[in-house]
Image (tube, grey):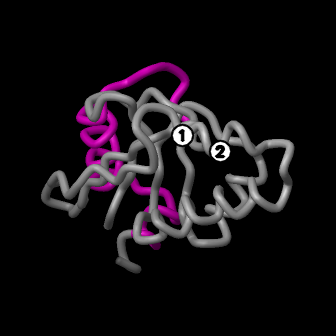
Amino acid sequence: MRVAFATTDGVNVDEHFGRAGMFAIYELTKDGYQFVEIRRFAEGRDTAVEETREQKEVHEDIVQKKVDRLADCKIIYLTEIGAPSAARLARKGIMPVKVKEVVTIEESLERLLDTLRTSPPPWLRKAMNNK
């Protein structure tokens, strides 16, 4: 199962979904995890998303393209996400996971792996079975 992390540095989960210029992608199995790639949407912040907020259709198209490029991921860790973007992810079968404070990607993966091994909630079991 692929997991994405909204990140500014490739180390921490520290970015809002829309603003994220890059996502670190990992492959997670019951046995562990492996880095796959950095998926870039912009250098630094994704200003195209921020600057088109007042241009409804243009903005929605840009956000949808981001969602589509992350469609192979089942979970996306982030610091914040707006309701419309969260709904777009849900329609693609992607679970957004908000972190309350900046946390390392490695720590997030370890916690997820521990949950997977001990007592995964139904949505996580389903995501793992539908790789």
Looking at the picture, which amino acid does disc 2 mark? Answer: Val
* Residue 92: quarter of image: bottom right
Left or right of 71 in this view: 107: left
- The spot of residue 93 in percent (x, y) is 57, 70
Query: Against 66, is 53 above or below?
Result: above
Q: Quadrant of residue 94?
A: bottom right
117 in the magenta segment: yes
Q: How crowded is mark 1: few (under 14 residues within 10 Å), some or many (20 or more)?
A: some
* 122 falls in the magenta region: yes
Stretch in magenta: 98-127
Front residue of 99/51: it is 51
Name the element at disc 2.
Answer: helix
Mark seen at residue 46: 1
Which residue is more in the foreground, 61 or 84? 61
Mark 2 in CB contact with mark 1 (< 8 angstroms): yes
Report the side of 123 relative to 30 (left or right): right
Q: Is 63 displayed left or right of 75 in the figure?
A: right
Residue 119 place in picture, x, y as percent: 38, 53
Tally the numbered discs.
Answer: 2
Residue drawn at x 79%, y 43% as measured from the top left: 53
Where does label 2 land, which residue? 49
Q: Of the residues shown, which amino acid type is indicated by label 1?
A: Asp
Figure check: 44 above or below 94: above
Q: Is the magenta stretch mostly helix, strand or loop?
A: helix
